[in-house]
């Protein structure tokens, strides 16, 4: 059919099921933008392009389908880079539409010109520059297909003059991508290893949630009487209320999970890339079972055996594999009975950890201890809610408290760890699941990066996200480093003059709540949810060295040694 390249791109978005595009208006894509209302596509203008790409990421994680964001060429497109990298490490199918300078001006140093593609090279699964206007639909289709086939972001780079012209094109959706259970011989070998294991443990990764494989993972765990631990910041990969659930490993996670996986002689890492940061020792527990046989299952063959030695690496869909594996195990070991000793051991480990966590969270001090606030907050968040978590000291501590019953409920910054993630991602998640309460958890530092300005977006676009801001007037994770390694010499970590974020929320047209007493937390959360409007809960909590979690990067820090005389007084005191 005869159409313009802009029409071809708009119709391709429609064919791929895109209903929302996030960005900031720009002259480079005005011709495409003009088509969005008639195409049935909602353009959501954000306050910053980083938040726009995070929103596309959040929407993709909740729906499981590729989503899109678009930016003005040059500075606008480059503001996507950090957020697209977050999507890359989350295996999230985001298509970044990046108009660039006109084709005749490439290389001349014109207004807002830079070669945009190298900036995205390491953090995309596929990138392509439209080299002819009549290839717009074809190359856009390719970006969407690769995004869902390889579970990651792609980039469509478009010279701004190529939105115009005439082409004869055909519009159709890309093929569905289905992944099987893995090779039959490998499933049989995995079944034999697990059937013979004395203490099998399932490590449920993000792939379990992404594949909607919780029911299959649960059935497998129950037949094996295998304890289940969540991988780092994937607290939604197995129901927290299940008797075999031990909670998440990783920074500020569950000691029960860490002590349990340490006992394993066989680990089934299901839908898990075994990221190195997520398996570091925590609480002085070096919990990774070095002598265990590891069965790693993932749709991405590149991650198999990458960071941990594995006995068996299987390319498979987590849902299909778990179902197939259970069938084979039942055939291999048809008379298997529940292991009462393991059930009792799991219950005991959880009871010890629950008791310890309750003691940590029992403060009744007038200025809320962060752990007391987190206890009250986690108990107040309604079942079925989606929670987006940022990076930082208090957001990391939520790893001990957040519990979920279903998939696609925990949207986190993961190992990219960029501050400012949560609010944008929460906006996308709310659009993807409008019936669920959606929370964005951020420290006061990270909130200043993105959440503060994006409240305006939520108000303008009627996206009722509930922000929870940990107001302790500091960059806590970095302050802890200065406590432990730099003799409490504080540089750049204190945020003494923060405004009231609750009042600023009201000024921007949102609901604003300032919480100073832990006894009122639950009432405030209920009020924010009931309002049905964008809301900000400013939680004023205790800061300083006595309440901070252990160092965020103990593996990467060391006590300083200074050699120049002018810095000698900064050396650690000799013991």
Image (cartoon, rainbow, N blue to C red):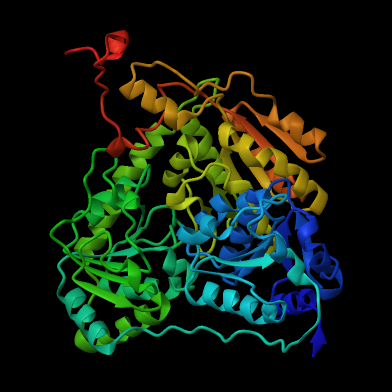
Question: With respect to residue 442, does 299 lie above or below?
Answer: below
Residue at left offset 18%, top offset 80%: 192
323 w.r.t. 313: above or below:
below
Classify residue 155 as left or right of residue 286.
right
Determine which quarter of the picture holds residue 267. Answer: bottom left
Say left or right for 403 vs 96.
Answer: left
Looking at the image, residue 139 sits to the left or right of residue 371; the answer is right
Residue 89 position, x and y percent, is 45, 58
Location of residue 261 (image quadrant): bottom left
- Residue 536, given in percent of the width and then of the height, sits at 69, 39
From the image, which quarter does the C terminus lie in? Answer: top left
The one of 59 and 160 positioned closer to us in this rendering = 160
Q: Residue at x 38, y 16 (%)?
A: 488
How many numbered discs, if any?
Answer: 0
Q: Pick the residue in front: 131 or 572.
A: 131
Q: Quadrant of the N terminus?
A: bottom right
Tell me if residue 433 can be seen: no
- Please report the residue visible at 81 percent of the width from the left and 79 percent of the height from the top: 4
Q: Check the image and name the residue furthest to the front.
A: 108
Residue 235 in view, yes or no: yes
Residue 496 x %, y %: 59, 18
């Amino acid at each position: 059919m005869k159409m313009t390249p802009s029409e071809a791109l708009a119709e391709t978005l429609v064919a791929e099921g895109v209903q929302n595009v996030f960005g900031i208006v720009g002259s480079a894509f005005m011709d495409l933008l003009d088509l969005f209302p008639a195409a049935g596509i909602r353009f959501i203008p954000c306050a910053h392009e980083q938040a726009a790409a995070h929103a596309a990421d959040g929407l993709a994680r909740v729906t499981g389908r590729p989503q899109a964001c678009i930016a003005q060429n040059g500075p606008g497109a480059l503001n996507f880079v950090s957020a697209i990298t977050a999507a890359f490490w989350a295996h999230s199918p985001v298509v970044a539409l990046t108009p660039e300078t006109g084709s005749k001006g490439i290389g001349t140093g014109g207004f807002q010109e830079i070669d945009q593609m190298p900036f995205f090279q390491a953090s995309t699964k596929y990138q392509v520059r439209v080299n002819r206007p009549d290839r717009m639909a074809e190359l856009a289709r390719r970006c969407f297909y690769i995004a869902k086939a390889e579970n990651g972001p792609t980039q469509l780079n478009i010279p701004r003059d190529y939105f115009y012209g005439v082409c004869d094109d055909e519009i159709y959706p890309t093929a569905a991508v289905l992944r099987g259970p893995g090779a039959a011989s490998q499933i049989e070998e995995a079944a034999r290893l697990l059937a013979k294991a004395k203490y099998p443990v399932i490590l449920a990764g993000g792939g379990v949630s992404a594949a909607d494989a919780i029911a299959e993972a649960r059935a497998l765990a129950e037949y094996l009487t295998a304890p289940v631990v969540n991988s780092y910041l994937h607290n939604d990969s197995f129901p927290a209320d299940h008797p075999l659930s031990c909670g998440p490993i990783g920074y500020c996670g569950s000691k029960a999970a860490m002590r349990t996986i340490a006992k394993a002689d066989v680990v089934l890492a299901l839908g898990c890339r075994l990221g190195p940061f997520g398996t570091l020792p925590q609480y002085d527990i070096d919990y990774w079972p070095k002598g265990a046989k590891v069965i790693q299952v993932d749709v991405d063959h590149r991650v198999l055996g990458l960071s941990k030695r594995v006995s068996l690496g299987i390319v498979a869909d987590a849902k299909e594999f778990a179902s197939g594996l259970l069938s084979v195990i039942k055939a291999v070991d048809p008379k298997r009975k529940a292991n009462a000793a393991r059930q009792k051991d799991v219950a005991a480990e959880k009871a010890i950890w629950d008791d310890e966590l309750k003691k940590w969270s029992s403060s009744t001090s007038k200025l809320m201890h962060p752990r007391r606030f987190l206890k009250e907050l986690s108990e107040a968040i309604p079942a079925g809610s989606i929670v987006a978590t940022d990076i930082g000291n208090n957001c990391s501590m939520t790893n001990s408290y957040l519990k979920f019953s279903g998939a696609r409920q925990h949207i986190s910054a993961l190992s990219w760890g960029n501050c400012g993630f949560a609010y944008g991602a929460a906006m996308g998640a709310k659009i993807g699941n409008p019936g669920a309460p959606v929370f964005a958890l951020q420290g006061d530092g990270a909130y200043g990066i993105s959440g503060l300005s994006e409240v305006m977006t939520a108000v303008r676009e009627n996206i009722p996200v509930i922000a929870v801001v940990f107001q302790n007037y500091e960059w806590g994770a970095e302050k802890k480093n200065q406590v432990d390694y730099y003799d409490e010499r504080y540089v750049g970590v204190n945020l003494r003059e923060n405004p009231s974020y609750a009042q600023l929320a009201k000024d921007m047209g949102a609901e604003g709540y300032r919480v100073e007493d832990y006894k009122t937390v639950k009432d405030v959360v209920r009020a924010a949810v009931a309002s049905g409007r964008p809301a900000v809960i400013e939680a004023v909590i205790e800061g300083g060295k006595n309440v901070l979690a252990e160092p965020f990067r103990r593996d990467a820090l060391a006590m300083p040694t200074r050699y120049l005389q002018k810095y000698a007084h900064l050396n650690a005191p000799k013991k």
